[in-house]
Image (tube, rainbow, N blue to C red):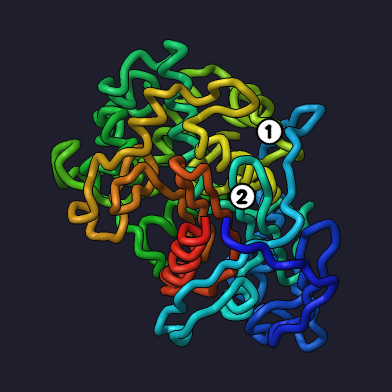
Amino acid sequence: MAALLAIPACAKSNSGTVSFAGGIGRNPAGPDMARYADALGHYPRADRSNWWRPSHSVDSFSRLDEVFPSAISAAPANAAPWRRATAEPAISYDGTARLGAGRFGLDGYLARNPTTGLLIAKDNELLVERYQYGRTDRHRLTSFSMAKTVIAMMIGLAVQEGRIRSIEETAATYVPGLSGTEYGATPIRHLLTMSSGVAFREEYDGADDSARLSALTIRGQSPGGAAVPRHFNQRIAPPGQRWYYASAETFVLALVLRQAIGRSIAEYFSEKIWRPLGAEAPAAWLVDASGLEVGYMGFNAVLRDYGRLGMMLARGGEAQGRQIIPRAWFTDMTRAHFSPSATGRYFGYGFQTWVFPEMNGSFALLGVRGQSLFVDPAKRLILVHTAVRPDARDPGGAETGALWRGVLRAA
């Protein structure tokens, strides 16, 4: 990396006092405290009625597996160690116009963005580990749609093991309860690439299909399982022809995976990924009324374990001298099956994975409200970001992308 900056014991910012111990920066506050805390600076306790509100998101996004039913993925007895840099790198980035243009460093970024956790690592060395709003390295921070990519990893493992014979087979081949439905008639390949052709509106306006999916799954307003996709059963395009982001596609993939492996996804993930990569703490998955891990969101882990997951991906699916994700699957998962022009977004799309437009092998796991994991395998460099952005369509995400470009320049 570029020049390293000595870490002070304590530093003031306009959003609180940052203290450093053991190379970890902690801030009991953060920007825009009036939005996230009460008059005394306390973060309101969340429940199922208010968890999505910005005013309760600091609490809910760091213990969503307690707010809703969940299943645990056990960690190994011994965690894979990190090296830790003696000082943070000198990183600067160009701020976006929305928050005010200019050149900023890490402190400036954190003072401008409602980040709960920020981790930057290269080659198994932790360069930056910061927390805001009183979050710590023991909080399980939620993923939102970053979980989708994790489901895609396990589909690849099930294919390697022969539990899924081919991704050209339909979902109903593995989930008989989907027989006679449009999702059931969709090949697994097109579920992986968000191109089922089944109508699903995901606009986060509280009245769209994603809100309905949430009600049917994590809020328990249906029996769960194969009963859920029947609520979304209008085909508007042949499979593979039209890209459209739809969380229901990942839920169907979770159904297929659960049936193919014959046990819980949380248990399978623990055995095949979490323990082999050397996680330090258990992970948790939100489940529906049937006990199925919903897959399209609801994965929860401590920040350094998100970092371990990212570093495994930066190494092409390898960790601790073992190829965890099949190499051929990793390559197919992280290449653009749909270009940015086809998605209409900044990114292209692979198997439940966002692909940077440079098409240089870099990719991202993204979730609403500011959750992201950026990976550059060529540099073995990652950035993990968890946040409480106040809106699912918050344009502040561009600021995290700008920070990532600054990290790449410094690498």
Residue annotated with mark 1: 73
- Can you identify the residue that label 2 sits on? 121
Seen from the viewer's position, the closer of residues 73 and 354 is: 354
Tag 2: amino acid: Ala
Q: Amino acid at mark 1?
A: Ser
Kindly report the distance in space between the C-alpha atoms of the residues bearing marks 1 and 2.
24 Å
Label 1 residue SS = strand
Q: Is residue 202 left or right of residue 220?
A: left
- The residue sitting at 53% across, 21% down in the picture is 323
Residue at point 30% right, 43% down?
194
The vertical placement of 358 against 186, above or below, is below
Q: Measured from the top left, where is residue 110 in percent x and y?
A: 62, 74
- Identify the image quadrant of the N terminus: bottom right
Q: Is residue 2 visible?
A: yes
Instruction: Kindly identify the residue that appears in the image at 67 percent across and 37 percent down.
Output: 71
The spot of residue 151 in percent (x, y) is 48, 35
